[in-house]
Amino acid sequence: MGLKILLPDELNNLIGVVVGTRPSLVKQAPVIRELRRQGTPYFLIHTGQHYSYELDRAFFNDLELPEPDVRLQGIEKCRFHGEQTAEMLKQIEKVLLTRKPRVLLVGGDANSNLAGALAARKLNLCLAHDESGLRSYTWNVPEEHNRVVIDHIADYLFVHHERAQKTLQAEGVRGRIFITGSTIGDAVAQNLQIAREKSRILGKLALQPGQYLVMTLHHEENVDYREEIANILQGAAAIGEAFQLPVVFPIHPRTRLRLEQFGLEEIHRHPWIKIVRPLGYLDFLLLVAEACLVMTDSGGLIQEAAILHVPCLTLGKYTEWTEVLEIGANLVSMNDPRLMVDYAETLRHTPRHWPDPFGQPGAARRIVESLETAFH
């Protein structure tokens, strides 16, 4: 039987980049731009984990990203985490065996990233993980399993902060750790002015700057349990009523389905909840930048809000982005409707002069320069 790995002399000086979800597209867009700017050979694998137009194609258009070189097929038919991860792993491995990159870059903690990481590790490729070192210490959350596994099998670990570096060192990871900052900061810096020039979302939704809130909600631990999602919606409605301001709610397909399954469609008729379809990146970025408060369970949006100096209420019972708590930019709702109202009032009156907790722009450049060392 032949070897089941790729040998170093078989590999090309080529970087594979894995995307598959809305957050990964936003995170990796600055890296892809930097690879193109430097003329570094790369290819893009899209796993298809997010496959609706609003969560996929619209972001490619807004971010002006090239079409993926490879799109995996049939992932939308996979229902369970293991099934989905296994199918992506199988297909990514075939791509890597054909293209033979020296490096594979994954970013974040979705199943797409775990599948790519396992495929690269099994073939003995250099595996790089952007957004390493995050921990929520909630072992029942799928993203926590994924990020821990990826960190412990990666060769290059890119972290946004010294705290993440210390976490990895305490866990005894084998790979090299690089403090690069967050590529979300790059994405905001690159796209906010474009959003201000191109987006007409406030006019379309009849909103005035500072006179509305934004909510997103999609994590499994929040929306797959009736009590949790019902409490969040109750709290959000109470906040809108207390503030006498609309809560703009671009609804994730998964969340819309859960509302139907749990018989919670009445939220569509609440006078202070304004449910809209998922938005493109530029529209959404501007919507967040001009909001008086954000409520979300998205790690990417938690970062974006802090960078934009918009106070944020985390929906859920934890956040791995502890820096935002320390600077007063964020509070965790615990999915308690009464606490949500109290915390929202506190955040509404919080001065917005906190420092950017995610470092200066330039993370993508630092990541690409580090990746290129694997070619030598």
Image (cartoon, rainbow, N blue to C red):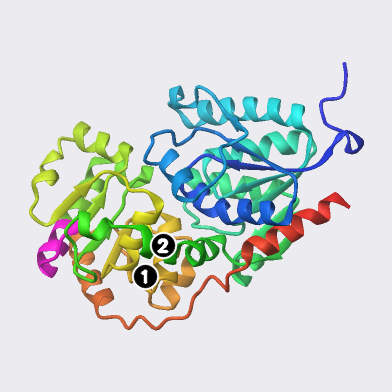
Q: Give the residue number, with chain letter if any, for mark 2.
A: 302
Amino acid bearing label 1:
Asn
Tell me residue 11's x, y (percent).
84, 37
Cα–Cα gap, marks 1 and 2: 8 Å
Residue 299, above or below 262: below
Q: Main secondary structure of the magenta part?
A: helix
Furthest residue toward right: 9
Tell me residue 85's x, y (percent).
55, 31
Badge 2 element: helix
Image quadrant containing the N terminus: top right
Residue 31, above or below 2: below
Tell me residue 319's x, y (percent).
43, 60
Q: Which residue sits at x=44%, y=39%? A: 57
Contact check, label 1 and label 2, Cβ < 8 Å: yes
Relative placement, left or right, of 117 versus 146 is right
Categorize mark 2 by other alpha carbons within 10 Å: few (<14), some (14-19), many (20+). many
As rendered, which of 21 and 322 lies closer to the eye? Answer: 21
Q: Give the residue number, with chain letter if any, for mark 1.
A: 330
Q: Which residue sits at x=21%, y=74%? A: 345
Asked whether the viewer can see residue 71, the reply is yes
Which quarter of the figure has residue 146? Answer: top right
Amino acid bearing label 2:
Ile
Q: Which residue sits at x=66%, y=40%? A: 117
Rendered image: mark on residue 309: none
Q: Which residues are magenta?
A: 235-247
Relative placement, left or right, of 47 versus 331 is right
As rendered, which of 85 and 333 lies closer to the eye? Answer: 85
Asked whether the viewer can see residue 335, the reply is no
Which quarter of the figure has residue 338? Answer: bottom left
